Amino acid sequence: MTQPDLAEVLNVSCAQVQKYENGSNKIAASTMSQLAGHLEVSVGYFFEDGT
Protein backbone atom coordinates (compact mmCIF):
# COMPACT_ATOMS: atom_id res chain seq x y z
CA MET A 1 0.00 0.00 0.00
CA THR A 2 1.42 3.38 -0.97
CA GLN A 3 1.40 6.45 1.27
CA PRO A 4 -1.18 8.17 -0.95
CA ASP A 5 -3.42 5.08 -0.75
CA LEU A 6 -3.08 4.99 3.02
CA ALA A 7 -3.74 8.72 3.30
CA GLU A 8 -6.94 8.30 1.29
CA VAL A 9 -8.14 5.41 3.45
CA LEU A 10 -7.48 7.39 6.64
CA ASN A 11 -8.70 10.69 5.18
CA VAL A 12 -5.46 12.49 6.06
CA SER A 13 -2.68 14.07 4.02
CA CYS A 14 0.38 12.21 2.78
CA ALA A 15 2.46 14.43 5.06
CA GLN A 16 0.43 13.21 8.03
CA VAL A 17 1.05 9.58 7.04
CA GLN A 18 4.78 10.32 6.94
CA LYS A 19 4.58 11.84 10.43
CA TYR A 20 2.80 8.70 11.69
CA GLU A 21 5.47 6.51 10.10
CA ASN A 22 8.46 8.35 11.53
CA GLY A 23 6.87 8.75 14.95
CA SER A 24 6.76 12.53 15.05
CA ASN A 25 2.94 12.43 15.43
CA LYS A 26 0.94 9.98 17.50
CA ILE A 27 -1.78 7.99 15.80
CA ALA A 28 -5.16 7.96 17.50
CA ALA A 29 -6.58 4.62 18.58
CA SER A 30 -9.61 5.17 16.35
CA THR A 31 -7.35 5.79 13.35
CA MET A 32 -5.32 2.68 14.12
CA SER A 33 -8.54 0.69 14.40
CA GLN A 34 -9.69 2.06 11.03
CA LEU A 35 -6.37 1.09 9.46
CA ALA A 36 -6.46 -2.39 10.99
CA GLY A 37 -9.96 -2.90 9.63
CA HIS A 38 -8.89 -1.85 6.15
CA LEU A 39 -5.89 -4.18 6.26
CA GLU A 40 -8.01 -6.98 7.77
CA VAL A 41 -5.70 -7.44 10.76
CA SER A 42 -6.22 -6.96 14.49
CA VAL A 43 -4.92 -3.80 16.14
CA GLY A 44 -2.53 -6.07 18.04
CA TYR A 45 -0.76 -6.72 14.72
CA PHE A 46 0.90 -3.32 15.01
CA PHE A 47 2.36 -4.20 18.40
CA GLU A 48 3.77 -7.63 17.59
CA ASP A 49 7.55 -7.79 17.52
CA GLY A 50 7.62 -10.23 14.62
CA THR A 51 9.46 -12.98 16.47
Image (cartoon, helix red, strand yellow):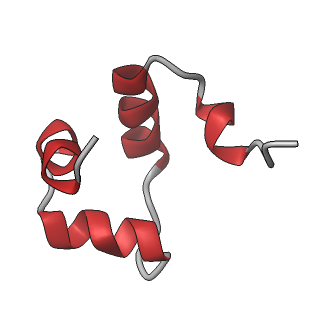
Q: Is residue 34 above or below residue 20?
A: above
Q: Quick check: 29 left or right of 1?
A: right
Image coordinates of residue 33 in percent, x first then y, are 45, 33
Q: Report the front residue among 49 and 31.
A: 49
Q: Quick check: 31 left or right of 8?
A: right
In the picture, residue 41 is in which quadrant?
A: top right
Q: Is residue 5 above or below residue 16?
A: above
Numbered circles on residues, count: 0
Image coordinates of residue 31 in percent, x first then y, are 37, 43
Q: Which residue in the rendered view is the most extreme toward the bottom?
A: 24
Residue at 44 percent of width and 59 percent of height: 27
Q: Which residue in the rendered view is the most extreme toward the top?
A: 40
Q: Is residue 34 above or below residue 25?
A: above
Q: Is residue 45 above or below residue 12?
A: above
Which quarter of the rendering shows the N terminus? Answer: top left
Residue at 34 percent of width and 75 percent of height: 19
Q: Quick check: 10 left or right of 41?
A: left
Image coordinates of residue 48 in percent, x first then y, are 76, 42
Image coordinates of residue 51 in percent, x first then y, are 88, 42
Q: Quick check: 5 left or right of 38?
A: left
Residue at 41 percent of width and 75 percent of height: 25
Residue at 60 percent of width and 23 percent of height: 42
